[in-house]
Amino acid sequence: MTVILMSRSEIDRMNVLRDLAEERIRVSEAVALMGLGRRQVFRLGKVFRQHGPTALVSRRRGKPSNRSYPTALRMEVIGIIRERYADFGPTLAGEKLAELHGIHLGRETIRQWMMAAGLWKDRRQRMRPVHQPRYRRDCVGELIQIDGSRHWWFETRGPQCTLLVYIDDATSRLMHLQFVETESTFDYFEATRAYLERYGKPIAFYSDKHAVFRVNKKDAAGGDGMTQFGRALHALNIDIICANSSQAKGRVERANGTLQDRLVKEMRLRGIDTVAAGNAFLPTFMADYNARFAKPPFDERDLHRPLAGDDDLDDAFAWKEDRTVSKNLTLQYDQVLFILEPNEITRSLACKRVMVLDYPDGRFAIRHNGVDLPYRTFDKRPQVNRRGRPRHRGDVASAITCSRSDSAEQGPSTPKPGKAATLHPKTVTFVTGAKSDFSKWL
């Protein structure tokens, strides 16, 4: 069986010619029905009797138009638009092609070419997606939505800061609020630890795609595809779900809008103008908010899991990075050179990987296979700043002055996204030994 592709007009002509061939209609009637001249009708009738319906199909079908632009021109235009005008609309792109490149094309031609190349979407494709509502989770602690809202919470009385919001999906109850300077990894470490110590471990946290929660670099060369915050939750057996849109986590987004109205005015009435005073007021505000707006859950069970004996929060909420030990038993982290004390364990670690643990409270640890290694710090820079706070404590014989870079989180070249700015002073100078001569440093 042969399949013949025909247009609607060709099918209508075939029916008329069949009736004409069987003498059910006259030539004058066929002329009127097809809207053609008598000579054209006779010609079509002749080829129809000889070759059948195939003779009525246009021979140009499937072939490029004789009026189409050359393929080379089309590829050149698409290349220019992709390189220089990728975010331009067809009209503006056409104007720039004419002004700067001497290529004059119609707007519709450019629009069709851009749509075929994936550089433009028509009106139907650009329609806003529909976000339909979903049911709440059944139990408290099943899903906790988290978000950071940067706002002038103290209006003109205090600095702009960020409010970290933890809200239960099942009840819309505010579980934890905390004012911080920035939405950083260490701030989330501190807030999440406070949440876990109060309520226990939820089943999952629901967040946006902030760099704290998700590795947004598609072609990341190293790492395991997990952020520091994600690694900490994985160690505690807590899932992290990243929403694809702000509407998907509408519970916490709507709560942010309510807080930016009510919380700001409540603090204005009480004259609160600092982060510390604001954090002290938050428990009182949360109790009043939950009494007004919280909903009863579908299921009365609380799915928060208590912290187990093997849940080490200090270890989980530490910034961890791997470093390679040199042949001289040294390694660099955050612009500082660490020297491992030679012993039976460290001598065998040359050219091997060890883990550096940077705790939120300023402590450091260098670990290999679960064993903390002894080390000392060597600073190659002579700059001394006595105003910085010490990162290491407990060694009375060591005079430590710190002033390392406030914003360095990934070393001197690439700052870590989200790490607290005040945790890393710029330079560290260590003068060790009980009988050291400190006069040369004064």
Image (tube, rainbow, N blue to C red):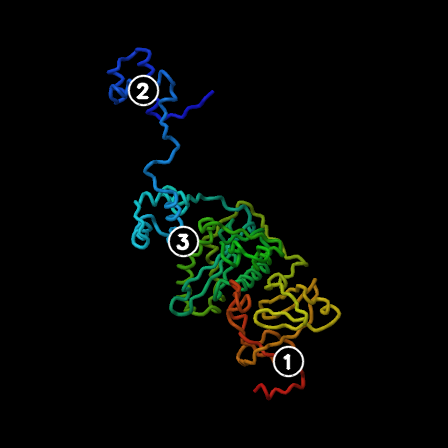
Q: Is residue 369 visible?
A: yes
Residue bearing mark 2: 44
Q: Residues within 10 Å of mark 3 (few under 14, many from 20)?
A: few
Q: Measure how far apart labels 3 and 1 are at the Cα level.
A: 58 Å
| Picture quadrant where residue 200 is located | bottom right
Q: Percent from the top left, x then y, of residue 152?
A: 40, 64
Which of the two marks, 2 or 3, is nearer to us in this view? 2
Q: Say what amino acid the circle numbered 2 marks.
A: Leu
Q: Measure how far apart labels 2 and 3 are at the Cα level.
A: 51 Å
The residue under the point 32% across, 21% down is: 13
Q: Nearer the viewer, residue 172 or 244?
A: 244
Residue bearing mark 3: 83
The residue under the point 34% across, 45% down is: 110
| Picture quadrant where residue 111 is located | top left
Q: Earlier in the sequence, mark 1 or mark 2?
A: 2
Residue furthest bottom in the image: 439
